[in-house]
Image (cartoon, rainbow, N blue to C red):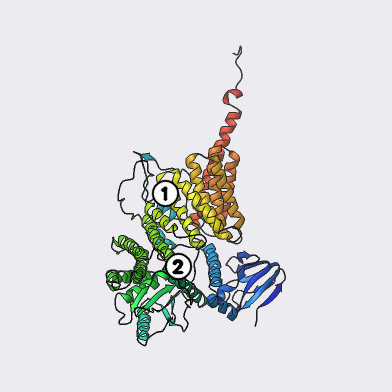
Amino acid sequence: MKEATRHYQDGEIIFREGDDSLAAFRLLKGRVKLVKAGAAGPVVLATLGKGEMFGEMGIVDGVPRSAAAIADGAVSATVIPRNEFLDRLQRDADLAFAVMTKLVQRLRAADERLARSAPPDSLPQTVAADGEDASPPPAAKQEGGAAEAKGGLLSRLFGRGKSAAKEAEPPPAGPPKILVARFGGDLPPEAAAILDAMVSALQGIPGAVVRRVDEAPPWPDGVKDAEASRRSAAAAAMAMAAARGADAVVWGRMETIGHLLEVRVSVPATPHELRLGRMSSAAGAFVPLEAFVEPLPALLRAMVLAAVLAEGPRRSADLFARLADDVLAAAEGVSRAVSGLAAAEQAAALLAWGSAAALVAGGEEMPADLWDRAARAFEDAAKRMPRAARFDWADAFIGRGLLECARAERGATPAAEAPPAPGAKPATPWDAAAETLRLAMEDVRREDRPWDWALLHERLGLIGYRQGLVSGDAEFLKESLNHYQAAIQVYTRAEFPQKWAEVISALAQALQVYGDQLGSVPALERAVELCRATLEERTEDSQPLLWAASQNNLGSALFLLAKRTESVETFLAAAEAFKAALAVYQINNQGRLAAIAEKNLARAEEACSSRARRDERLARPDWAAGTPKEGGG
């Protein structure tokens, strides 16, 4: 079967839920609805337009269709047979990257997490793009020149503490699938024993399915830049993982100098996330052919486990426990094991261990100083990297920045090394994270790494928002707004509508806090506009919970605006938005989110009644109802 163009009439079924996944489709004309059977009837998962691909998920993971595809109007589509599609994924790293991007966008749209708990009662609660409570609290009170911040506020707002992380943990999705690719280069006979030992070490991962494949991610020939060559091979490894439905691929080559096996780990692409524990292509291990002994087996398992667990779907207590054991087992030995290697090789191992350690730092029964040891590993890795290796150097600081974000979220921020200078912004738990990610930004250029450039701006926008919440300093919020505006230069509405809506929603929340702190009606009006814009991309049919979150946030923005303008009509509009959110949450059995919307609705309705009574008194004052006294005057 060869690639062909097919035409479908309105309502025609292109494929049914449960059909074998025999082909992928690219829309040339018209729209297609992806529909899944539900307990209460069919549910529209997405409506796709010209240029979008569908049907690829079943090919990537090798399972039957998880939803039906139905033509919405006249449709023309290119049909790409399964084998041809898989061949293209393996040959074309850009195609694999694009496919993974789309899969991640769809998974993110379906990933609704419950709100954590209510913030202070003085303002309505907003609900973030992912369904979490993200309400803007009142500006922090200033006392003695320092911002007063309650320790538990951020964990309540953003749900990133221990209990919240456990609550948001997705259910296990089956055993992790790990591939060990054929290593490139001229392998001497003794390399076979090392590869066997690596496979045995990986089989120590609970429930892991470890399989060797006779395929090597190609390292480009004739590329003088070693960093660029490795990144190209990493992209091919990511495509291999995606095409074969693996959670991770262990790959590498025989180093031409030094008699070492260069070992790297890649996972299917997730380009629109900065995840703690992510294993960049700069991280790796260099294994001498003489022996594969501790801490190398522990470090290899830690690399693979961190890479898999950072992506989320395979999270489980057993895997985290194994990762924690391996991180501790490798901790003391890594520095000794790499002491005789070149600086760049030492940097790769330190970066790998630091990334894995960051994922388990702060966990139960983990050493209290593991945060600091992981941070030092990132610093030492950066010091050993050639400064010309801009991508690798930036990855070291991204890893350290994500660690500092996690440390702040869990209330484990180290004490400030020195008191702030006179006139400096008030200190916040997020300062170290912001400073480190700004260092990474120095070597992440939009033209080279557009996704990372946008992601860093998005993360710095979130950090600025949190700094503003804690300190009450509007300057932090202004920085947050600038970063979010930069991110949507890459995540345009036309090209990435759902990611655009996510960032715009965050921008609207920052504007709400900024406008409320400064009493700025224009800022609040802009927040209302942005909330309404997200509702143009999130429909109630295809993304009901995201749509409800946007309605709730719209209600919050309208409520704050109404407080400033004293407009009963605006309070009524806020109440209508809260009602819309409440109805969807109730239908979808989202009890805690429904409670938030119901509480917000009650506040808006009470505000309406209160203002209406006041306006009536002003229009007809008490003295106007009385009878003038005789003789008046």
Residue 242, horizontal then vertical, whole percent = 51, 74
Residue 366, horizontal then vertical, whole percent = 30, 64
Q: Are the residues at dot 1 and dot 2 in contact (C-beta closer than 8 Å)? A: no
Disc on the earlier residue, 1 or 2: 2
Task: Give the residue number, with chain letter if any, for mark 1.
Answer: 467
- Who is closer to the viewer here, 439 or 527? 439
Task: Give the residue number, with chain letter if any, for mark 2.
Answer: 311
Quadrant showing the C terminus: top right
Disc 2 crowd rating (10 Å Cα; few below 14, some 14-19, many 20+) is many
Residue pictured at 37% horizontal, 46% vertical? 149
Q: Is residue 110 visible?
A: yes
Under mark 2, the amino acid is: Glu
Disc 1 crowd rating (10 Å Cα; few below 14, some 14-19, many 20+) is many
- Who is closer to the viewer here, 576 or 27? 27
Q: Quadrant for residue 569, please give it.
A: top right
Residue 601, horizontal then vertical, whole percent = 54, 47
Quadrant showing the N terminus: bottom right
Q: Quadrant for residue 615, please give it.
A: top right
- Who is closer to the viewer here, 570 or 585? 570
- Who is closer to the viewer here, 481 or 489? 489
Query: In whole angstroms, how far apart are the C-alphas of marks 1 and 2?
Result: 27 Å
Residue occupying the far top of the picture: 631
Residue 463, horizontal then vertical, whole percent = 43, 53
Under mark 1, the amino acid is: Gln
Determine whether, in the image, residue 94 is placed left or right of residue 397. Answer: right
Dot 2 falls on a residue whose secondary structure is: helix
